[in-house]
Amino acid sequence: DRSLKQAEQFEQVAQTMVKLLNRLEDSNQRTYYIRYCAEILPKGM
């Protein structure tokens, strides 16, 4: 588990999420997960 309270770790997790989301070919699915990640990332989940 990573503490997202630290900026460096937050940035690292965000970059990893972007790499994974870019692999999704279906734009609707990608949009769904981008929104989902945008909701949970600030919460540190």
Image: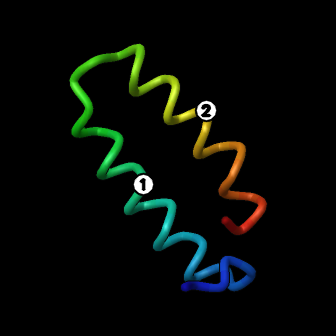
Left or right relative to 21: residue 24: left
Please state the total of marks drawn on the protein image.
2
Residue 42 lies in what quarter of the image?
Answer: bottom right
Q: Are marks 2 and 1 in contact (CB under 8 Å)?
A: no
Can you give x and y, in whole percent of width and height, for residue 25 in the image?
Answer: 21, 24
Quadrant of residue 17 in the image? bottom left
Location of the N terminus (image quadrant): bottom right
Q: Which amino acid is tagged 1? A: Met
Identify which amino acid the numbered label 2 is placed on. Arg
- Percent of width and height locating residue 7: 66, 79
Q: Looking at the image, is mark 2 or mark 1 earlier in the sequence?
A: 1
The residue where tag 1 is placed is 17
Q: Which residue is mark 2?
A: 35
Image coords of residue 32 (percent x, y): 52, 25
Name the element at disc 2.
helix
Eyeballing the image, is 3 above or below 19? Answer: below
Residue at 39 percent across and 49 percent down: it is 18
Q: 26 left or right of 37?
A: left
Q: Residue at x 49, y 34 (%)?
A: 33
Q: Residue at x 26, y 32 (%)?
A: 24
Q: Is residue 20 above or below residue 34?
A: below
The answer to whether residue 40 is above or below residue 25 is below
Binning the other alpha carbons within 10 Å of mark 1 as few (below 14), some (14 to 19) or many (20 upward) gives some
Spatial CA distance of label 2 from label 1 is 12 Å
Tag 1 secondary structure: helix
How many residues crowd mark 2 within 10 Å: few (<14), some (14–19), many (20+)? few
**Up/down of 32 relative to 41, above or below:** above
In-image side of 45 versus 23 (left or right): right
Estimate the x, y position of residue 37 in percent, counting from the top left. 58, 45
If the image is split into quadrants, where does the C terminus sit?
bottom right
